[in-house]
Image: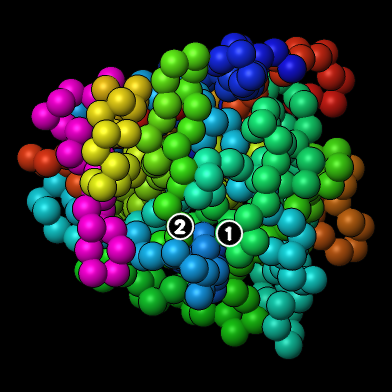
Amino acid sequence: MSIHKVENQLLLPTYRQDPPGTHPAHLYEDYRSTVGRAPRIAPVDLPQRLTEVTGPIFGSDRVGELDHDLTRQHHSEPIGQRIIVHGRVLEGANKPVPNTLIEIWQANAGGRYLHHADSWPAPLDPNFTGLGRTMTDKNGNYRFLTIKPGAYPWGNHENAWRPAHIHFSLFGRAFTQRLVTQMYFPDDPLFAFDPIFNSVRDPKARDRLVSRFDLANTEPSWALAFEFDIHLRGTDSTPFEDDKDDH
Amino acid sequence: MSGSTPSQTVGPYLHIGLEWEDGAYAAEPETPGAFWLHGRLFDAAAEPVPDGMIETWQADPVGRFDHPDDPRGMRETPGFRGFGRCSTDTKGEWAIHTLKPGSLPAGDTETEAPHLDVSVFARGLLNRLVTRIYFADEEAANAADPVLKSVDADRRHTLIAKASERGFVFDIHLQGEDETVFFDV
């Protein structure tokens, strides 16, 4: 691990900054809610010291037995297209992040969230909550079984629709690595019209929000599969491996 | 090499995925010395933000972490998780039950005053915002803190929690006259 000297006794990892364009700017006017909520004063640089290079590390006690299977959390199965969503959590180039908590949430197949603030007239599904949790294994792999969420309208602009997506929350191992994002599905016709998706200005970075259809991991006669690798910020020392599995 | 996965907003339905029954308890109930660190989250118009979430991360009372990358060694404090999360309610209010962190070494000669690192999430925030909470009763330590010293003197007060009946109070202003200092980490 590459380290920098903070003082004689304190050798800490340093997490690399992401290149400009990787993450959205706080203010992106096409997404109207940013206007009244994005700070207007430039952020102050915070050196990475002890609080920043550490972070909460959760155990499997945070995850219930069926939390990874959103199709088995009620008496019957939810309505919708069964899908497997799987991939790896990596840091930097492609170093696996083992034993880290992943939280997901999503709309049901009709595009409706089980939430008091969601009142558009698509049906709720009594067999679908839309909450998932799991831990990555020792190689950074994770796997959920769920149903494909539907697109839904929202009030951002006239006839605005969100492309189908699943929210992902990750901790990694350090405060610097905390990430909340959204996973999308390949070739969604709504991409071009969605300001949240397009708030990521670098097209290559934007592509990293889109899962890959994965025929090889489809369960025949059961569920389609989508692969979504999540890359957290790496340390300066994260090796640049030429990994054949890296898509 | 692949770059990092971009951030996206938590959106208005964050509660489905991110709320924990014990989320607010960075220190378990009944922990001796624990208090409520609480406040409100405001937008540009000074209106409360009812669909946000605050997360906190901090050292234990003697300034140690239960984490392998703390070169002084991991140290577990019974009843103390160091991490808290609390969504804001309709009045923009949040609260974390915690212990005051200790000071931290920050170089050959410097010491960081007791502080928490904070992530702010909300509908309308495409990326989390990072801030810090310091304590008003640590005047001498705050005056010597390298991060506070790097902030314009007339904005430092936005990073300092004040004593309240329940513990300490810290309001966060996303924008406006008293915009909180946010950090790039």
Q: Is residue B97 visible?
A: yes
Percent position of residue A122, x then y: 45, 75
- Quadrant in which the N terminus of chain A is drawn: top right
User: What type is the residue that disc 1 sits on?
Assistant: Phe
Q: Tell me, for residue B146, which label it has, or none.
A: none
Q: Which residue is mark 2?
A: B99
Q: Which residue is mark 1?
A: B80
- Kindly identify the residue that appears in the image at 74 percent across and 85 percent down: A76
- Kindly identify the residue that appears in the image at 79 percent across and 71 percent down: A65
Percent position of residue A205, x then y: 54, 25
Left or right: where B18 falls relative to A210? left
Q: Name the chain letter of the residue that bears numbered label 2.
A: B
Q: Name the chain letter of the residue that bears numbered label 1.
A: B
In primary-sequence order, the first of circles 1 and 2 is 1
- Quadrant in which the C terminus of chain A is drawn: top right
**Residue B152 sits inside the magenta stretch:** yes
Q: Quadrant of residue A198?
A: top left
Percent position of residue A168, x then y: 58, 50
Seen from the viewer's position, the closer of residues A136 and B172 is B172
- Provide the secondary structure element on which disc 2 rests: loop
**Residue B1 sits inside the magenta stretch:** no
Q: Write down the region rendered in magenta.
A: B150-172
User: What type is the residue that disc 2 sits on?
Assistant: Leu
Asked if labels 2 and 1 touch by Cβ distance under 8 angstroms, the answer is: yes
Seen from the viewer's position, the closer of residues A182 and A8 is A8
Q: Is residue B54 above or below residue A172?
A: below
